[in-house]
Image (cartoon, grey):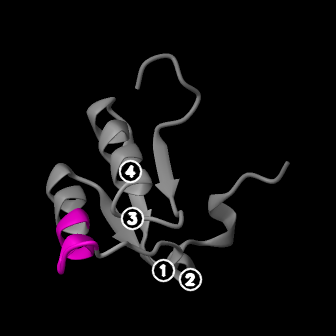
Amino acid sequence: PKNTPFSTLSHADGNCCYCVRFTALDAIREGFRATLISDGCRGINLQSGDIDRAIDEMKQAGVETTFAAQIPDDNYEQQ
């Protein structure tokens, strides 16, 4: 990533079909490592399968997936 002090984006948000998906895909395009925290997101199934398609698209682009319990506490810097 260009001129940034970090290289990984871990993302959880309310909507994995739109906000999370676009943020994760942008991060991958910009050269960041992106991880979707699956249990920190929900989707909007406007059409049946929207959530699965959004997650598949992210995975195909290189976004990793994990669950909150799998992230070690020491993964976050204390402020």
Range of residues picked out in magenta: 46-54
- Where residue 69 is drawn, which disc sits there? 2
Mark 1–mark 2 CB contact (< 8 Å): yes
* Label 3 crowd (10 A; few <14 / some 14-19 / many >=20): many
Residue denoted by label 3: 16
Of the image marks 3 and 4, the number of the one nearer the N terminus:
3
Q: Position of residue 8 (x, y in %)?
A: 47, 45
Of the image marks 2 and 3, the number of the one nearer the N terminus:
3
Of the image marks 3 and 1, the number of the one nearer the N terminus:
3
Of the image marks 1 and 4, the number of the one nearer the N terminus:
4
- Where residue 28 is drawn, which disc sits there? none
Helix, strand, or loop for circle 1?
helix
Of the image marks 2 and 4, the number of the one nearer the N terminus:
4
Helix, strand, or loop for circle 4?
strand
Q: Nearer the viewer, mark 3 or mark 1?
A: 3
Left-right relation of 73 to 78: left
* Label 2 crowd (10 A; few <14 / some 14-19 / many >=20): few
Between marks 3 and 1, how big is the CA–CA gap? 10 Å
> Which residue appears at 50% of the width and 16% of the height?
3
Residue denoted by label 4: 34
Between marks 2 and 3, how big is the CA–CA gap? 19 Å
Helix, strand, or loop for circle 2?
helix
> Which residue appears at 32% of the width and 32% of the height?
31
Between marks 1 and 4, how big is the CA–CA gap? 15 Å
Of the image marks 1 and 2, the number of the one nearer the N terminus:
1
The foreground one among 18 and 61 is 18
Which amino acid type corresponds to the residue marked 2 in the rendered image? Ala
Residue denoted by label 1: 39
